[in-house]
Amino acid sequence: MTDKYQGWANYETWCVNLWLTNEEGSYNEFRDLATEFEEDQIYEFGKEIRAHVEQEIDAMIQNSQGFDP
């Protein structure tokens, strides 16, 4: 049995990719960000994306606090 999902390493990786590239604006933002890094700087690029995702998650949590459906 494999843990792969939709051709990605796992569901979480697939989900973050979809989240980052599903809309044209975010797709362009991350594509432009990628051009700022050299090929041998993939780790630094990954750290930059991780920081962005963590900021977005924190913002979503902050926005949802006190939300009573």
Image: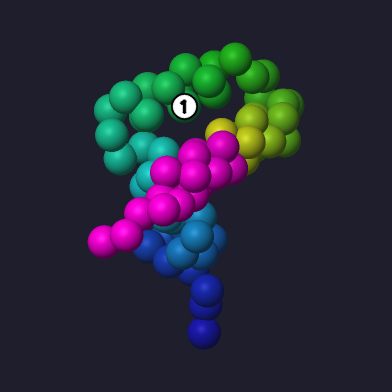
Residue 39 in view (yes/no)? yes
Any magenta on residue 51? no
What residue is shown at x 37% (from left), y 22% (from top)? Answer: 28
Query: Depth check: 15 or 54 in front?
Result: 54
What residue is shown at x 47% (from left), y 17% (from top)? Answer: 32
Going by the image, does 24 lie left or right of 4? Answer: left
Residue 23 placement: quadrant: top left
Image height of 61 relative to 36, above or below: below
> Residue tagged by mark 1?
30
Residue 55 placement: quadrant: top right
Amino acid type of the residue tagged 1 in the rendering: Phe
Going by the image, does 35 lie left or right of 46? Answer: left
Count of number-bearing discs: 1
Where's residue 67, x and y in %? 35, 54
| Region rendered in magenta | 53-69
Where's residue 16, x and y in %? 46, 49
Quarter of the image for the C terminus: give it: bottom left
What residue is shown at x 46% (from left), y 64% (from top)? Answer: 11
Any magenta on residue 62? yes
Mark 1 is surrounded, within 10 Å at the Cα level, by few (under 14), some (14 to 19) or many (20 or more) other residues, namely some
Query: Depth check: 30 or 40 in front?
Result: 30
The secondary structure type at the circle numbered 1 is helix
Residue 17 in view (yes/no)? no
Prevailing secondary structure class for the magenta stretch in the rendered image = helix
Image height of 30 relative to 5, above or below: above
